[in-house]
Amino acid sequence: MACSNLTTMWVSPKPSLSDSSSLSFRSVLNPLPLPNHNTSPSRSSSVSPIQSSLRELRDRIDSVKNTQKITEAMKLVAAAKVRRAQEAVVNGRPFSETLVEVLYNINEQLQTDDIDVPLTKIRPVKKVALVVVTGDRGLCGGFNNFIIKKAEARIKELQGLGLDYTVISVGKKGNSYFLRRPYIPVDKYLEAGTLPTAKEAQAVADDVFSLFISEEVDKVELLYTKFVSLVKSEPVIHTLLPLSPKGEICDINGNCVDAAEDELFRLTTKEGKLTVERETFRTPTADFSPILQFEQDPVQILDALLPLYLNSQILRALQESLASELAARMSAMSSASDNASDLKKSLSMVYNRKRQAKITGEILEIVAGANAQV
Amino acid sequence: MTLNLCVLTPNRIVWDSEVKEIILSTNSGQIGVLPNHAPIATAVDIGILKIRLNNQWLTMALMGGFARIGNNEITILVNDAEKNSDIDPQEAQQTLEIAEANLRKAEGKRQTIEANLALRRARTRVEALNTI
């Protein structure tokens, strides 16, 4: 009696259960959005209902987990490198401070003289050299793209003005871009490596120096990415040559910044999150200084000082570019890790529901089989 | 009374301590600096810097720049500086040979300027190894 009651109890809800289970199957799979993430593995991005087996889903979850580990590690590596890049900037400060001080002093003492140094000669512009600083590796968001787009825009401007141009490309990404476009005349391909030192800056400076002195070009402009903050960086164009004797850094529109003002960025933590603080400081230029006797002609001395200044400018540009690339990579990898963990979560949910549905199905089959024998 | 010497390059401070005497190569020849030297400012050529500490001479290769000699304070700003103990003899010799080959191949004013600069630098590095 009790048995038959039980079996009827099992039998009657059976059809409705199986219906609802198949309904729940479909309802589980359809609303699954599965957005196209950057890190989604190369398999099909939409889960075809019922065909994708549990094993495929499990493999996919594993690969997403691995990808997340990689992107997380890349982010930490980039953060460590930003610190190192910042140290390099700090190490270069004594040099640029002293240089600025000396330049000021000499300019004061040479107020009345007419200085005629080759590097400051302003000629009518017929040809412009563009030094384009890009990165070596990818996976850094839009970093390389921004700079290259800015370079292309500037080239179009120069063409519109009827000026000839040549490009000096620093960085593997820029090199490969310009190599594929033979219609853009490129003077030299250089690489900065993982940490720009004075040697690399010297290589660029030599090239630029010889181009300008031999009068092949009349103006040299530097295109690099200025490091504004961890999430923002700006591609800027600075006029490198001809230098102004006072050592001002001039923007392409003619806005000049005094050389004594310097901006430093510092990677610190605020409320547990990495942030960057910029501080402007002014190099103290002593009003009173011992009247230095010049061993050589003042012109010769300026001749020796200005290439130093050129070098330090180029090095600063390379360092800032590197810092922006690292910051861009940090934020790109961080968002990739977040996307990967979201994807893993949604995939796990699908996996679990499938697994449970499969188990329920098996139970139902067993029960149906048991009932059929009765 | 000792001199305080500071050798600065754009990416690091190469030397910052007290010395007894230095011999510097400038555009107008070599000058020796002892304590209480008169304050002068001079351009530094691509050449050798010799430093004396307690009867021991140390050599450094400088790649051109500027020097300011004040009240017992010498500040040298150069594009690059290498102590002779940091230079690899074979690598320096190879760089010299490559530079000479480049100079022979150079065509036109621009390449000659570049090649000359590179040659002078390479030569200075090799010289730094050869002097004491």
Image (cartoon, rainbow, N blue to C red):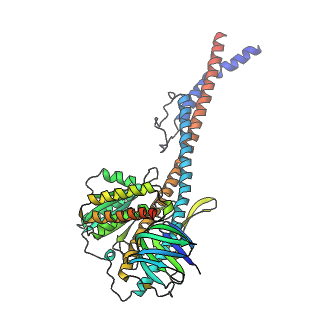
Count of marks overlaid on the render = 0
Q: Quadrant of the image for the C terminus of chain A?
A: top right
Residue B78 at x, y percent in the picture: 45, 70
Looking at the image, the residue that sits furthest to the right is A2
Q: Quadrant of the image for the N terminus of chain A?
A: top right
Q: Is residue A356 left or right of residue A85?
A: right
Figure check: A39 above or below B78:
above
**Residue B44 or B12: which is nearer the viewer?**
B44
Q: Is residue A151 visible?
A: yes
Figure check: A304 above or below A131:
below
Q: Quadrant of residue A159?
A: bottom left
**Residue A198 or A128: which is nearer the viewer?**
A198
Residue A63 at x, y percent in the picture: 53, 37
Q: Is residue A184 left or right of residue A263?
A: left
Q: Quadrant of residue A354?
A: top right
Residue B75 at x, y percent in the picture: 50, 76
Looking at the image, the residue that sits furthest to the bottom is A112
Q: Is residue B120 left or right of residue A342?
A: left
Q: Is residue A189 visible?
A: no
Residue A239 at x, y percent in the picture: 36, 70
Q: Quadrant of residue A345?
A: top right
**Residue A310 or B6: which is nearer the viewer?**
B6
Residue at 60% x, 26% y: name it: A358
Residue at 35% x, 53% y: name it: A175
Figure check: A357 above or below A110:
above
